[in-house]
Amino acid sequence: MTLMLDKLAAQESKRVLGDAELTERAERLSAQYFDGRARPASVRWVTNQNTRWGSCTPAEGSIRLSHRLQGMPEYVVDYVLCHELAHLLVPGHGPDFWRLLEAYPRTERARGYLEGVVAADRLPHVPGARGERDA
């Protein structure tokens, strides 16, 4: 049973949503966690965000997610979507914003995952690591 769950988790983490699926997912998350009040006009992947996981322009209702999230576990993508959806309701990162985001139950787990990714990127390169062959 554990092996099957591991395989399912691996498949889930490799699934890449298209922009249309991303929009549908954002609408479902808004309905589930924000009573449908966060209504994005557009949600799409972008390749020009290398220092942020996502961004939002509330005046336009546009949400952009970094392509670097593609292939990460769905709960991580959902967290970033919820984060950006929350910005449609509350600009900035004040207490009201974080209270709103508490509605998403995997916030802390997803933040920890993303912090781990950032930390791993900062580690020094070790030859032969990560399946690379020594020359």
Image (spheres, rainbow, N blue to C red):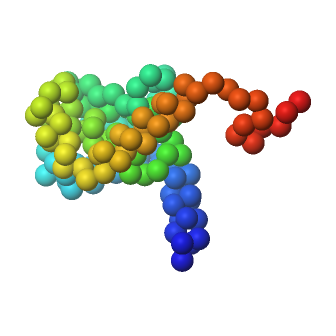
Q: Is residue 131 above or below residue 60?
A: below
Q: Is residue 31 above or below residue 52?
A: below
Say which of 93 and 85 sits in front.
93
Location of residue 6 (image quadrant): bottom right
Q: Quadrant of the C terminus?
A: top right
* Number of numbered markers: 0
Residue 70 appears anywhere in the view: yes
Where residue 17 sits: x, y (%)? 47, 48
Where residue 110 sits: x, y (%)? 37, 45
Residue 122 lies left or right of residue 34; in this view the side is right
Determine the residue located farthest toward the bottom in the rendered image. Answer: 1
Determine the residue located farthest toward the right in the rendered image. Answer: 135
Instruction: Tell me which residue sits at (39%, 41%) in the image.
Output: 112
Instruction: Tell me which residue sits at (78%, 35%) in the image.
Output: 128
Where residue 132 sits: x, y (%)? 78, 37
Residue 108 lies left or right of residue 86; in this view the side is right
Instruction: Tell me which residue sits at (43%, 52%) in the image.
Output: 74
Q: Quadrant of the N terminus?
A: bottom right
Residue 45 appears anywhere in the view: no
Q: Is residue 97 above or below residue 77?
A: above
Q: Is residue 67 above or below residue 9?
A: above
Where residue 100 sits: x, y (%)? 15, 41
Residue 73 lies left or right of residue 34; in this view the side is right
Instruction: Tell me which residue sits at (37%, 31%) in the image.
Output: 54
